[in-house]
Image (tube, rainbow, N blue to C red):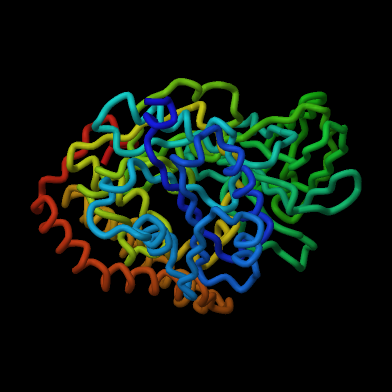
Amino acid sequence: MSEAEQLPFVRIVVLTFDGGDMTLRCLRSLAMLDWPTDRLEIVLVDNGSLDDVAEQVKRDFPTVIVLEPLANLGFAGGCNLGIMHGIDGAIADQIDHIALINNDATVDSDWLRALVAAMDTDPRVAGVASKMLFADRYAPLNIEILDELEGGRRDELGICITSLRVDGERCDARFQFDEGFHGAVDPDRARDEEFARWSRRSGAVRLIDPDSGSHRVALRLNAKRPLRVRLASDVEAVELVVGEGGETRYTTVEVDLGSTRIDVINNVGSELYRFGFAGDRGFMEPDTGQYDAPTEVFAWCGGAALLRATYLDDVGLFDERLFLYYEDTDLAWRGRLRGWHHVYAPSALVRHHHAQSSGVGSEVFRFHTERNRLLVTARNAPLKVLALALAAEIRHCTKVNLALLVKRPLMLKMPSRSEPRHRRAVLAAIIRGLPWALRHRWSELGGERRAVHRRWERDKW
């Protein structure tokens, strides 16, 4: 028997939703895989796109199977359609493994070999996570608050960046803020703020720049109180005081960026945190080799993973009621509860344009991640965790509605309605979904038998 005949048969499922050129780049990278074509099948699910990518794929990639459901089935439904195409009965009767790859990602030629090698280490490995890097390379600018922040809490506000210029030009879309920054808030247009991003104690602002040229970056800053700040690039460090005069006073500082460019991690396996939050392991960290060893992980990211067919036959497919986000955490968690485990393959390299379809921070992203976290927790976590998570969600919804709809008018300010409306919609969707989540909880493994080993209880439950 030849080597090719001994290799497992793999079906790769790719979803596209108005993916255009990104989808074509993804398929080109898959066409370069070091894997025998007779042991490989690529299925593209066009999830209700309005572009003509399906026709282009049929013309340019004749071996790719194109499925067009003429509707957006979400990630869960689209993946399930691709996984089950042409299969009547057990998946493992026809296919050894299912690979998933986002259409906004490209893979190295040995990506699949690395995933399969990791899968072969143990027959109870259900899923293998890839090493996902952001597609772009970045010029870094590190920011550090040198003074003590009051209370030392992670949520404490440091400085606020209100505008950025690169060589005198505004280009907000070229900047990435790492986990050392809070999410964007509404800028004060009356004071000419272009955006508003508050730092924590330390963080990095990164300029997307594939070239190796030098740049001059200008930042407009303020703070609630005077703070000593250090800004450091690869070629220059500047220390200054920001916030003298409070938030109404702005300080502008310029820093040179040199030729250093770094890769930044998107996902190297997924972890589980307090209250059922799932997170990308290594997210936003510069790739310096700290995740170059294979290891067990709590879950894999559905954007680039290999799944064993017998695992899917045992546990089931993605739950289509989740539609989008947390469906991979749910499926991985359900597997762990049935004795399967998941590993990370550092040599399975993928470059990914993060959240291109729905957008991080968009209403679609926020609604589905916030709703689905509670529903997946209800289905899989200990009841104590569910109770704490649900109580925290109710408390947060109440707090936001009181603050923005009741307290603001009492202070002679206009009420803010969008965030309270969003919080009520999320809570209502959670309550509507709880019955089916709890039914599955009891029917699959029986009530409270939901223990997760302490090593996965990040930040303690």
Q: Quadrant of the C terminus?
A: top left
Identify the residue at image location x=60%, y=49%. Answer: 27
Q: Is residue 438 above or below residue 450?
A: below
Residue 286 visible in the snapshot: yes
Who is closer to the viewer here, 22 or 426? 22
Who is closer to the viewer here, 393 or 441? 441
Q: Is residue 78 above or below residue 29?
A: below
Q: Quadrant of the N terminus?
A: top left
The x, y position of residue 304, in whole percent, is: 48, 43
Who is closer to the viewer here, 126 or 39? 39
Q: Is residue 58 above or below residue 224?
A: below
Q: Is residue 444 above or below residue 226?
A: below
**Image quadrant where residue 207 sits:** top right
Residue 201 visible in the snapshot: no
The x, y position of residue 255, in whole percent, is: 83, 34
Identify the residue at image location x=49%, y=27%. Answer: 346
Q: Is residue 303 left or right of 449 when viewed as pictured?
A: right
Who is closer to the viewer here, 255 or 287? 287
Q: Is residue 10 left or right of 410 when viewed as pictured?
A: left
Q: Is residue 26 left or right of 100 when viewed as pictured?
A: right
Identify the residue at image location x=75%, y=48%. Answer: 174
The x, y position of residue 273, in whole percent, is: 35, 42
